């Protein structure tokens, strides 16, 4: 009779170990699944954030080049026709490139900062005559202010994405 009691106790002990192993395996599988989801989300956030930073740098460079070339073209009296054509060509290229980098829309009937930049980008080349110099300077200055606002807003989004791990709508 002693032998039967020992066998029953071992079986109960084995059940306890088996349940422990199953629970441990389930927790391990759950952790692996959550780790994969977290890694996928982190990789996505990192990619979007990295691309947003590259876009900010490229947009900043394109806007400053556009403003600089326009300024130079309207002030340089020693340009040859060939140089002037090259500058105008570069200005036109940048105008369209910058427009493609923006997301113009209206919010509650008002143009967003992207739309205001797009309007200025279209307006500035029409102000290149010497008689419009003051308005040109004012428009280029306004372009810089609007661009600073856009860049600052986007940088804040990048910081939040990095901190919180969530993509913010544009």
Image (spheres, rainbow, N blue to C red):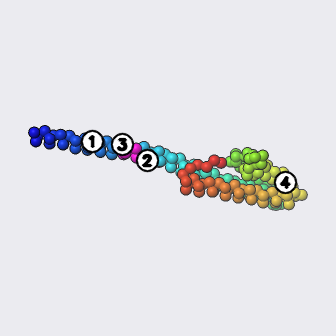
Left or right: 64, with 10 as reference point:
right
Q: Main secondary structure of the magenta part?
A: helix
Q: The residue tagged with tag 4: helix, strand or loop?
A: helix
Mark 4 lies on residue: 127
Which disc is residue 65 wearing? none
The structure residue drawn at horizontal position 83% and vertical position 57%, both measured from the top left corner, is 136
Q: Would you say the residues marked 2 and 4 are in contact, meaning their CB atoms lie under 8 Å apart?
A: no
Say which of 135 and 145 sits in front: 145
Tell me the residue that label 3 is attached to: 26
What is the crowding at mark 2: few (fewer than 14 residues within 10 Å), some, or many (at least 20)?
few
**Mark linked to residue 18:** 1
Q: Is residue 154 left or right of residue 66?
A: left
Going from N to C along the chain, the mark reached first, 4 or 1, is: 1
Residue neighbourhood size for the residue with mark 4, other residues' Cα within 10 Å, grouped as few (<14), some (14–19), many (≥20): some
Task: Give the CA separation, mark 4 to mark 1.
Answer: 82 Å
- 10 Å crowding of disc 1: few (<14), some (14-19), many (20+): few
Q: Residues within 10 Å of mark 3 (few under 14, many from 20)?
A: few
User: Where is mark 2, residue-wise?
Assistant: 35
Mark 2 falls on what kind of element? helix
Q: Is residue 125 magenta?
A: no
| SS for callout 3 | helix
Span colored in magenta: 25-32
Q: Is residue 27 rendered magenta in the image? A: yes
Of mark 3 and mark 2, the one earlier in the sequence is 3
Query: How far apart in space, not on screen, are marks 2 and 4 (Cα)?
Result: 57 Å
Q: Nearer the viewer, mark 2 or mark 1?
A: 1
C-alpha gap between disc 3 and disc 2: 14 Å
Question: Comparing marks 3 and 4, which lies closer to the viewer?
Answer: 3
């Amino acid at each position: 009779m002693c032998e039967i009691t020992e066998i029953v106790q071992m079986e109960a002990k084995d059940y306890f170990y088996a349940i422990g192993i199953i629970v441990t395996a389930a927790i391990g599988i759950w952790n692996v699944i959550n780790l994969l989801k977290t890694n996928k989300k982190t990789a996505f956030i990192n990619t979007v954030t990295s691309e947003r930073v590259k876009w900010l740098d490229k947009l900043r460079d394109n806007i400053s080049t556009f403003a600089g070339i326009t300024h130079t073209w309207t002030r340089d009296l020693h340009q040859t026709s060939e140089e002037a054509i090259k500058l105008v060509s570069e200005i036109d290229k940048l105008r369209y490139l910058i427009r493609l980098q923006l997301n113009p829309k209206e919010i509650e009937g008002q143009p967003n900062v992207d739309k205001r930049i797009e309007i200025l980008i279209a307006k500035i080349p029409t102000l290149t005559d010497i008689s419009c110099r003051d308005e040109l300077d004012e428009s280029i200055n306004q372009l810089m202010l609007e661009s600073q606002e856009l860049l600052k807003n986007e940088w804040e989004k990048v910081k939040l994405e990095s901190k919180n791990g969530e993509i913010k709508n544009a």
